[in-house]
Image: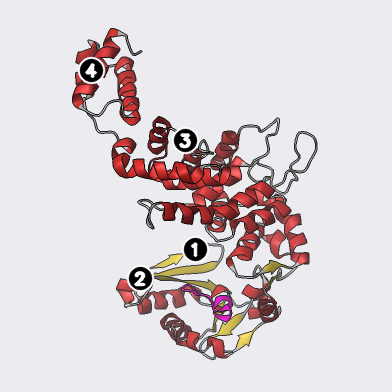
Amino acid sequence: MRVFQLLLHHSAVRALADAAAAEGVEAHLVGGILRDRFLGLPSRDVDAMVSDRGEAVANRLGKALSARVIHLGGKQFGAYRLVVRPQDRGEAHEYTLDLWDREGTSVEADLARRDFTINAIALSAPRGEILDPFDGFPDLRRRVLRATTPSSLAGDPLRVLRLVRLSVQLPGFTADPATLELAREAAPAVAEVASERVREELSLLFSKPEPHRALSLLETLDLYPGLWLGRPGEAVRGPHGERASAGSACRELGELAPRALHLRQLAGGTLPLPVRHRLARLAVTFAHLPALARDADTMTALERLSSAGYLTRKDAADVRTLLPWDRLPAEEPERRRFLHATGELWTTAACFAAVRHEKGWAERAVEVIRLERAEGEAIRQPPQLVDGQEIGRLLGVDPGPEIGRAVAALRRAQVDGRVRTREQAVALVRSLASGSLG
């Protein structure tokens, strides 16, 4: 196809063809780079396979592209990754080349192991011959995600999540009904997939636009709220036997991006800190977990997902920071505590609050923005006005928990705006010593 001609002149593709020829083996481009090129989507990474001698080809490529070769397959199979950096090659962008050694098996057999027909297409390098044994091109034209074989999803249940991700990543794509049924059958086995692979897919999924569509599909596959509650593939029922619905969560997910734009407009066109959409989206999914007798605590579900390895500890901590703020505070002391508690996540928390409770949000957001501009840094990180040793002298106590309590009280007073100077800090500590502010 003419659409692939320029692709054959890509520096990495030329280097691949030369390295394969030097080793006397066949080379093909496969997967996402062909799919995205056909759809007119940007694609920097290159997926390729050779018929044999993968390690030798990878080493030649490493030298030709000034890239380090990483062996991904261990002793089980030949898979190699090369990261080509702009400063090393004079390229416009960094990109990754993943190379698979099919070790003498046929191209058709190798394509049969791939997840969806739109990824089971190969282009020989440098001849440009196309192989499409599973009718991937017709599916690309119809914008349909269809399993390559009936065992594609059961063989690797992570592909159930990948089906959801590609449904929102690729514009206008929907899942083939038979593939959707295969995904539903394979969903319970997601629990058996290595946690880091699930974590990566979830992170990618909630980084894409239209997260409400993704959550709706997760609900269809009983992965939401099932996976969140430790029961992937299981229909979750409410206290009266009703099936849990993600409708409200989907609505709020769809409103997050407009609220972020509105917040930027309220701030005069620019925000001091970016809205972290992925975290806000994750927080919405936790905020709408059904209150079940055996799992009524949202924070417990958050800890479970983190302990299972499906969320990083950092992401879990950030989501935990967002969850209490289902509305923006109306009074200044509470606004100050909001800015202190959320820190660099305050813009994200403001958008989360907007979709959770919109009434009066814009007016409150304006006041938060005003306060943040005037005193934001001092509220988030109050300066140390007196140190621990001086507090001990003022209290007349040795180092211990009393000093810690005084430090916490002083910080609260600074956040609330009641203490702004060293003199006020000393006066507060002295009042603590006299017992008037316990």
The amino acid pointed to by label 2 is Arg
Instruction: Examine the rendering and report whether any part of residue 309 can be seen.
Output: no
Task: Please state which of residues 113 and 251 is positioned toward the viewer in this rendering.
Answer: 251
Of pointers 1 and 4, the one earlier in the residue sequence: 1
- Rounded to the nearest angstrom, the CA distance separating label 2 from label 4 is 58 Å
Q: Are marks 1 and 2 in contact (CB under 8 Å)?
A: no
Q: How far apart are marks 1 and 3 (CA)?
A: 50 Å
Q: Nearer the viewer, residue 162 or 397?
A: 397
Q: In terms of secondary structure, where does tag 1 sit?
A: loop
Disc ID at residue 427:
4
Q: Is residue 350 above or below residue 401?
A: below
Among numbered discs 3 and 4, the one appearing first in the sequence: 3
| Distance from Cα at disc 1 to Cα at disc 4 | 62 Å
Pointer 2 local density, CA inside 10 Å: few below 14, some 14–19, many at least 20: some
Quarter-of-image position of residue 18: bottom left
User: Image quarter for residue 83?
Assistant: bottom left
* Element under disc 2: loop
* Residue found 19% across the figure and 14% down from its top: 393
Which of marks 2 and 1 precedes in the sequence? Answer: 1
**In the rendered view, does 405 fall on the left or right side of 116?**
left
Q: In this view, does 26 lie above or below 241?
A: below
Disc 1: which residue: 72
Identify the disc placed on residue 85: 2
> In the rendered structure, which segment of residues is drawn in magenta?
35-49
- Mark 2 or mark 4, which is nearer to you? 4
Locate the N terminus by quadrant: bottom right
Q: Which residue is drawn at 33% across and 16% down?
A: 401
Q: Name the residue under label 3.
A: 329
Label 1–label 3 contact, CB within 8 A: no
